Amino acid sequence: MEPLSPLPALPRAATLAHSAPEVFAPMADALHWRQIEGGVQQCMRLLEYTMADVYGPQTLLRSGLLPAALVQGHPGYLHAVQGVEPVGGRRLYVAALDLVRGPEGSWALRALHTQAPSGLVASRWSDAHAAIGLQQVAKAYQSLLRGISARAPGGGQAHIALLTPGPYNESYAEHAYLARYLGLSLAQGSDLLVRDEMLYLQTLQGLQRVHALIKWVDDAWLDPLELRADSTLGVPGLVQVLRRGHVLLANAPGSGFLESSALQALLPALARQVFGQALQLPTLPEGWSGDGSGGPVVGGSLEMPSVQWRVFALADEAGAWTVLPAVPADAPAAMGAPDAAGTAAARTPIVTSRAAENLFWLGRYTERTENTVRLSRVALDALGGEDQSCQPPLAWLSALALQHGLVAPGVPPAQQARRVFERSLVAGVWDTRHCTGVAFYMQALVLAASRVRERMSPEHWGLVMQAQESLRLPQAETLHDPVQAQRVLVHISGLLATLTGAQTERMARDDGWRLLSIGRYIERLDFLAGALAQALHTGSLSAQAGFDAVLALFDSTIRFDAQDPPRRTLDALLALVLSHPDNPRALACVLHALRACLRDMSDMAQGRTAELAARLPQLPHLPDAAPWLGAQDAPQLSALLQECRMAARATSDALNSLFFVHRGDASQSVGA
């Protein structure tokens, strides 16, 4: 793998809980680190033993060392996995431990996180990195992955995925970063499904078996069938897959009770009983109030600790524990990429069906936003122009605006009530409730982009946010001001041009990117063919204002005026917007690009995309437009334009059924 570009620094709250900036470097020297390291390793061995006993023989419960009410009454204890032996023989692989240091300098365990331990990517360096070295951090990740792979059903060829709650989770950027850096498939619950008691990832290549799942979702949300029925974050049937031994979960479900501060108060006694040793990393002096929730009762007065610090424990391939501080977000170039060559995910990048669908719609909404901006600008120019006597262009632009929802329903067309129509068109730039205008499609663009944020550079995502911010609702006095609207539309046009460049030049050119491009071409073909057909129908091309407006809408004015020799004739215009080989918005060029992208994906879905490419219409060369024009509305050309629109929509429907929906046999979805 190539080293990855770092993601934006995470919010401090994701790394340290309520810590002041001055306490980010609690390490004094390597000696202190070694003392903490030994204490954390002992603590993790004790926790692994405790969890295995609680879900196995339960000797600690029967002996009274662990109160049953504290364990089985805790919401983090899962009856559904009682007696389930984990794949690979161990339950804990990753944990976060919050440590505190009092004024006297001693360290103690304040909190433990085993279900979804966030903060592995830190917002800055700490002295601990100098103490342990970045290469050791990289080796720890390598060893973790090798250990998981070796214990998983697939062995050395195991497909490992990272389960995230999704882009609305505050730690999503960290999840995306780790998945990319470690070479894992990033998956949300909706990306996964159960068939024949095995776990599968829905991808562009079809269903792919998942052998191991590193989860960053709290246990209760993992399976709506057997745990929380209202969960949309998990996978129906996942617990049954676990029972059958067909997937390794890291960490194994059911560790939530270990996070109880009341249980942590019992760790010193457990260490003496289990290991015959004193606990090297003491816990805060808290007691148990007797209820299952594990709320602490602090005995005596406790001075607030002066330093809080989060460290992480990672299981290695030998079964031991490596202790690390959080990894700086700018560290991977120095660390080097982990050697995950033993995993299938590292060798073959996988595009999930969800990511592919969102990329497809990101392309469509980007193009749709551009089209809406351009149509709004052309329409406002026409409505504010000096020549208002020519009705066909107004009728054409009015029909397009109504057809695409740029004005509120019921507004009379521009040729009947020009100022009323203009006010509605301007208001529609900002309106997301009644109109499908610029702000509406920008909102859809942002939503699609947020769902594939892991594929975007920080600068790319910043452009998306900047474009959205530019469409904030203006003050009431400028809400219907066409001059203000045009100013904003010009600014948005520039941002969208940059955003399109980022999509073209700064995203990985895999099949997901091809679907993004296909989405753009489908949208462009449908919009431009429909706009030209409407222009023919209203007779707009016979008027100079309509002639110029069509060129502007096709973003082809400069190319047209640069012809040598210049020819402002109808056949020259049609040749440029229909078949000119150098015009990326000529319909023939759009069809050619769409056809090429579909053919590039012909190795998937049994070559069905090549069939889709073959079905696209062919536009003949047009040295002379006369044969295409009839006395009224050029019926032959209109029919061809309608064929282009139908082909665009049919291609979209076919791609949806080929790549975005994996129906299969519903009776085999989950185990009984």
Image (tube, rainbow, N blue to C red):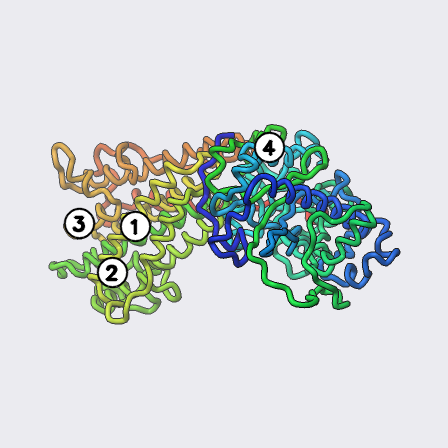
Residue 643 in sight here: no
Residue type of the residue flagged with mark 1: Ala
Residue at left 33%, top 62%? 472
Q: Are marks 1 and 4 in contact (CB under 8 Å)?
A: no
Q: Separation of disc 4 and disc 3 at Cα? A: 71 Å
Find residue 560 and name its label. Answer: none
* Residue that numbered label 2 is attached to: 485
Q: Which numbered disc, 2 or 3, marks the residue that appears first in the sequence?
A: 2
* Residue that numbered label 1 is attached to: 531
Q: Which numbered disc, 2 or 4, marks the residue that appears first in the sequence?
A: 4
* Residue that numbered label 3 is attached to: 542
Q: Position of 1 compared to 423: left or right?
A: right
Q: Which is nearer the eye, 273 or 180?
A: 273
Give the mark toward the camera: 3 or 1: 1
Residue 432 spot, x, y in % from top left: 38, 63
* Residue that numbered label 4 is attached to: 139
Residue 312 in sight here: yes
Residue at left 59%, top 28%? 341
